[in-house]
Image (tube, rainbow, N blue to C red):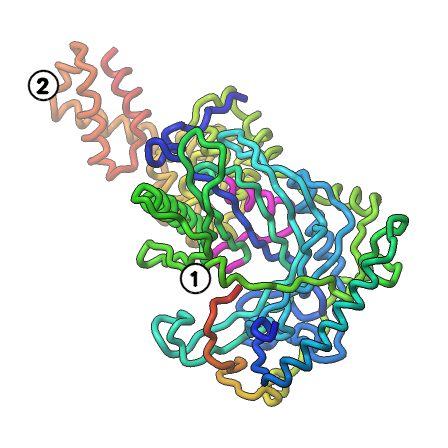
Amino acid sequence: MAIPMSSEAAKEFIPGWEMVIGLEVHCELKTRTKLFCGCTNSFGQEPNTNICPVCLGLPGSLPVINENAVELAVRIGLSLNCKVDESIFHRKNYFYPDMPKDYQVSQYERAINENGYLELPLSKKMVRIERAHIEEDTGKSTHVGGGGGRIHGADYSLVDYNRAGIPLVEIVSAPDLRSADEAREYVSELRAILVASGASDGKMEEGSLRVDANVSVRRQGSREFGTRCEIKNLNSLRSLVRAIGYEAQRQVELISSGERVIQQTRHWNEDQGVTTAMRSKEEAYDYRYFPEPDLVPLSPSGEWIAEIQGRIGLLPAVRRERMASLFDSVSKGSTLDQIVTAVGLGLDDLVVAAVESGADPKLALARATNEVASDVGNLANLTVANFCELVIMESEGKLSATQAKTVLSKMLESGSGPQKVVKSLGFEALDASVLEGLVDQVISSSPKEWERFSMGEDQLSGFFIGQVMKLSKGKADGKVVTSILRSRRA
Amino acid sequence: MANLAKLSLSEEEELMYTGQLAAILDHARDIMALDTADLLPTAHPLELRNVLRRDVEAPSLDRDEVLSQAPAAEGGRFMVPRILGEAP
């Protein structure tokens, strides 16, 4: 399958400069319970209802590792081509009330997964994965008083520990990304892998997937890295792209005006579209990492790893191959883009099923990546059978393209089948004889145009189709009308 | 170190703790002087590996009871003093 090269234009944001980006992605694992205790792992519960002595760090409580969290972490590692090895846990100590223990348990020296890679689907670029380690999530603070819920100026803070102790895997890439578009492509692909492997639901909007971006700039051709800044609070792909663009621009302007970039952590402000300094390296925390004495090393056996490998579903790269095989050629960029979108949103099963039941592949892919993708929140309303039926109706010309799009949107909204929606919208295809009657009606009421069309002025077919459409109130299929016109002319 | 631990110590306390910490460091230095070339590094004194539990839910604590133990609470959440720094 032919793959278009990534556009050079996207790489060069300011002529003569290059961005260097590495990403840290925190992914919440789809377990039933927390990492070290039996509290429920779920989003959106009443505050402080999923807490126990272990996740509250009460004296005398002891953590025990959730077997399923280890399995899901290994699934991530294997899916990212990492070496899965013996690992240990450390305590990361700090003074901040989002962890009641005053430390977060994480893997510091030896991560469960190390040295993998991910291949970007469009540019085919390899991005190295340095590590994908297990750690526990922190609680959630709400800042009260002051301006806009930010810490500075807050009168006090309120803490909810439901999230404290939820299992996370932090996936750290090497600084291999060179543009905001590549960063977006990386996160989309990583998200698709995390969902396909069954490790995470990948919902950025619910915080299941959180991204920090390390950004620096350098002159084109330079091999040295510039001083980097870490950007936090990137809650969507859109924020990621905007924040990287802003931050790289800021750094280039600093350097160009003779100043220097200070290594610091910066906060992305979505409303103002800017990054602002949170803390500089000089005041960086000393986390005083030390081995967690309450946990023994983790050492998944070869047999267990092999078992886990067998439970990983089809990964995006394989799914894309499977979809590509439905087409004679995917050399066209748009088809490949659509395939990547479909797999990224998990819509590929729909398309494959529709094609297997006789639908036109291009049509099935287009409906999935346009209409279904734009309302993916309602995907649960769409059964595979209903999608197949709709696309086949369009393939067979029973619905025009415009009608099919409208019907599909309504199906997603309501959960009804295509027949029912077609009926309620009055989209039943007109009987051929009715259509012929309409065509004849238009011909007799426009004799001059008909004469010119008969003499070979093909462009007038548009006029006739338009008139028939008007009479049929939009229900006529343009293709059928054209063929009737041709047969009348002959 | 007192700074890191956010402790305000008197001058006498500082002097006392400096002595005590120096003794601890001396002890660590004694251990570091041992020849460990033939020993494998250990991550934990126990030789155990993979102490795991099944992913099964256990009851959580009653929120009101927990919050009644906290110095202050509001709207089902723990109330803490104004936080100066950002989250790490």
* Horizontal side of residue A443 vs A387, given as left or right: left
Q: Is residue A195 magenta?
A: yes
Residue A258 lies in magenta, yes or no?
no
> Measured from the top left, where is residue A317 in percent x and y?
59, 34
Specify few, some or many for label 2: CA neighbours under 10 Å numbering under 14, 14-19, or 20 or more: few
The image shows residue A239, relative to residue A15, as above or below, that is below
The x, y position of residue A124, in whole percent, is: 53, 29
The three-letter amino acid code for the residue at tag 2 is Lys
Which residue type does callout 1 highlight?
Met
The image quadrant that residue A473 belongs to is top left
Q: Which residue is mark 1?
A: A278
Q: Position of residue A137 (x, y in %)?
A: 60, 63
Pinpoint residue A70: horizontal percent, then vertical percent: 73, 54
For image coordinates 40% across by 51% down, the residue present is A239
Question: Secondary structure of the magenta portion, mostly?
Answer: helix
Which residue is tagged 2? A448
Closest to the observer: A152 or A252? A252
In terms of sequence position, does the residue under pointer 1 or pointer 2 come before the other? 1
Secondary structure found at label 2: helix
How many numbered marks are there? 2
Would you say B57 lies left or right of A145 here? right
